[in-house]
Image (spheres, rainbow, N blue to C red):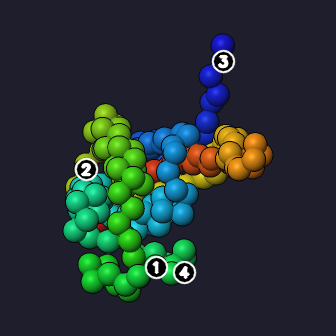
Amino acid sequence: MRLPKYKYSVQTDPDRSAKASARGIDVSRKAAREVCNTIKGMTIHQSIEFLEAVIDKKLAVPYRRFKKNVGHKSSVIGWSSGRYPVKAATEILRVVRNLENNAENNQLQLDKCRITHAVTLQGTRQQGMFYRAHGSSSPKMRQFIHVELVAEVAEM
């Protein structure tokens, strides 16, 4: 049995960068996109602290694109509307910790590593059935996502 081989959507220098990805995560793609856009540009330690604060509901993730009917939060920095996507933050935190371990394995300086590429991609779909009254049913699709993170050593 051959396993699928995934490529990253960005090419980087392997001597100055570290990569991590997660495939087939059962998380809201909209929430994961907003979390990834928020941690892009942060250092690895800043992103870990931010995601742990989101999981503890101390800091909210700003919702910039999918902001319709999203309430204002006082803990959002630089934006008004936001939420606490705990499930998405938990899964992306696992990928960030994996990225941290990969950066240590590549002998990169963790205090200078910034997340330069954080993206969510459309994954597979799983069809299910939503059972209705009188013996009928409707189709139901579950959407999975892929998350890619790349950290590079920043020029000082």
Three-letter amino acid code of the residue under disc 4 = Lys
Quick check: 62 above or below 154?
Answer: below
Three-letter amino acid code of the residue under disc 1 = Val
Three-letter amino acid code of the residue under disc 3 = Arg
Which mark identifies residue 60? none
The secondary element bearing badge 1 is classed as loop
The secondary element bearing badge 4 is classed as loop
Which mark identifies residue 2? 3
* Residue at the image position 25 percent from the left and 50 percent from the top: 110
Give the total number of marks visible in the rendering.
4
Of the residues tagged 3 and 4, which is closer to the observer? 4
The answer to which image quadrant residue 49 occupies is bottom left
24 or 57: nearer the viewer:
57
**Circle 4 crowding by C-alpha within 10 Å: few under 14, some 14–19, many from 20:** few
Q: Residue furthest top?
A: 1
Comes first in the chain, label 3 or label 4: 3
- Residue that carries the numbered disc 4 in the rendered image: 68
Q: Where is residue 145 in the image (x, y as percent from the top left)?
A: 57, 48
Of the residues tagged 2 and 3, which is closer to the observer? 3
Comes first in the chain, label 4 or label 2: 4
Comes first in the chain, label 2 or label 3: 3
Three-letter amino acid code of the residue under disc 2 = Leu
Report how far apart the C-alphas of labels 2 and 3 lie in the structure. Answer: 35 Å
- Residue that carries the numbered disc 1 in the rendered image: 70
